[in-house]
Image: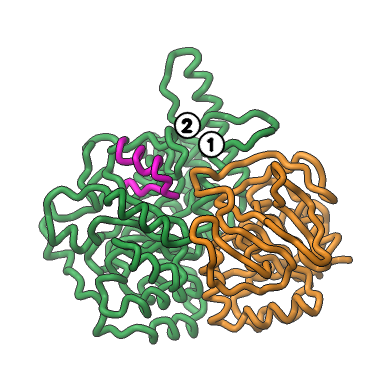
Chain colours: A green, B orange
Amino acid sequence: MLPDPFPELSKARLYNVGFYEIAEFFYKLAEVADRLKEESGFLAYSPSSLPDRLEVPIRGTVRVKHGFPIFQKGGVCMDVTNPEQAAIAEDAGAVSVMVLDKLPYDVRKHGGVARMADVKVIENVMETITIPVMAKVRIGHYYEALILEEIGVDMIDESEVLTPVDEKHHINKWLFKVPFVNGARSLGEALRRITEGASMIRTKGEAGTGNVAEAVKHMKIIMGEITLLRRMSPEERMRKAREYGVSYELVDLTAKLGRLPVVNFAAGGIATPADAALMMWLGADGVFVGSGIFKSKDPRERAEAIVVATSMWDDPEAVLEAQSMISEAKSMMGIDISKLKPEELLQVRGE
Amino acid sequence: MIKIGVLGFQGRVYEHIYMLKILAKKYKIPVEAVIVKKKDRLEGLNGIIIPGGESTTISVLARKFGVLDELKKLIEDGLPVMGTCAGTIFLAKKVSDRVVGEVKQETLSSMNIEVVRNYFGRQRESFEIDLDIQNIGRKFRAIFIRSPAITRYWGRTRVLAKLNGVIVAAEEDNKLAFVFHPELTNDLRVHKYFIESFVAR
């Protein structure tokens, strides 16, 4: 077995603070925001607090929203464009599916404006399978998000793969009862998205390329920055908080946890079981696979193989077994990222 | 030393391990948690927890790595087991889905309960509430995330908690089942009950 790539974060998978306490942290932020709101009409960018005793079910709370991604941990979310692909994903053991109009690879080839998927397609997928269904919205598009919440998708991906509608702002995700996942290339970006209410983070990578290099880069940057944060004095963390544009408390919490305070998946260019296992080894809690499965010539086998490799990444024998289930000749061809023009990069959308 | 396995293919694995760690520290109970992903790790366990996660995923992997049959046998022979959410689905003898209906997924078929998946709806309908649970206590913060419900029970199964008439916790001999997530709270009572009344019995 390979040694831990980030030994100082070796306990990163095992929280040294419970989920409940992390959720409490967000409520504490809320209390401060509420006081500010009373005094100055400040727009709350944090969750509203709960009464002491819950006599009736309360929906869409922080614990419920942040709790959802935790049950995805160790699993694979697969991009699908129709109910048939969704059924293949479910049979293979995916923990959820992401419904798109076009796979990221085709978004690249097709050009034009990429928008949320067809409402009918999303509804058809939801009626076909039993596992959670996610869908993407354009960065900053409140109404696509509202529509997805109305349909009842289980999680919304505010995604750079689609064409952003707001160059400067993301959605204020605290306003929604459905949890959100956002992409990030660095710790600052991840913490800004968490501040806006994201319940889950994924690396951006470079979607639709079949090349995992950018996802590796982004995961290493995030883990490296957390390692540095742990060694910093409170004053230095204060400076970092200003640099990132987030609260000192959130930076401090991240340093103490030795990991992001929300679930962190890898995404962008994962195409083989070995790619998935590599990302898990680097500290991902699970993976998103976009074009990698349904742009290959062996989607059924590949889907199951990636599920196996993601769950059993720390067992070389099992990863070998997973990798043997697929054939490299059937992998998606992929795109050389260095050949892409700067304006063709998706990862630079939404800082 | 009490050795508790946590079925570790996918889901809220580390959250259960965290709860066991805190339980051991707070009550000075010598509990050690092991992640089980291969059948040789089932040896010498005093109890096992099947965590929440996606039950179809857990089924696929447990079958592939031979854990399913081995675990089924151990539970039949009396190994104490606690299931939460997907874990309860995994223990049930009969499973269906609220929207899709009949499902073909493989389970351990150990407990005399019928479970309906996604009973309370989708993620949007997920909620938290304070419950009174028999043998465990009052005002337990229960977090329901796309949770199933127990719709029927027979044999020696006993109901531990209901929410608006729907069964959300039950026990039968060596088996304890919750459709919600005690591992997402800071309340150790459920884990303590499992260790004290099932494992260290």
**Magenta stretch encompasses residue A215:** no
Q: Determine the secondary structure under disc 1.
A: helix
Q: Which span of residues is magenta-colored?
A: A143-159
In the image, B116: left or right of A307? Answer: right
Marks 2 and 1 share the same chain: yes
Viewer-side residue, A41 vs A138: A138
- Report the front residue among A1 and A95: A95
Amino acid carrying mark 2 in the image: Ser
The image shows residue A56, relative to residue A275, as above or below, that is above
Q: Residue furthest top?
A: A39
Q: Residue drawn 54% across and 66% down?
A: B102
Q: How many marks?
A: 2
Q: Badge 1: few (under 14), some or many (20 or more) residues near its Cα, within 10 Å?
A: many
Regarding mark 2 in the picture, which secondary structure is present there? loop
- C-beta proximity under 8 Å, tags 2 and 1: yes
Q: Horizontal and vertical percent for residue B12?
A: 58, 59
Q: Is residue A145 magenta?
A: yes
Q: Disc 2 to disc 1, how far (Cα)?
A: 7 Å
Amino acid type, residue under disc 1 in the picture: Phe
| Residue at position x 31%, y 35% in the image | A142
Image height of A179 relative to B105, above or below: above
In the picture, the disc for residue A46 is: 2
Q: Is the C terminus of chain B in the top left, top right, bottom left or bottom right quadrant?
A: bottom right
User: Relative to residue A205, is residue A271 depicted above or below?
Assistant: below
| Rendered location of residue B193, percent (x, y) | 81, 56
Report in which chain the residue with disc 1 lies.
A
Residue behind mark 1: A26
> In x, y percent, where is residue B185?
66, 46
Residue in view at x 21 percent, y 53 percent:
A346
Res A218 quadrant in image: bottom left
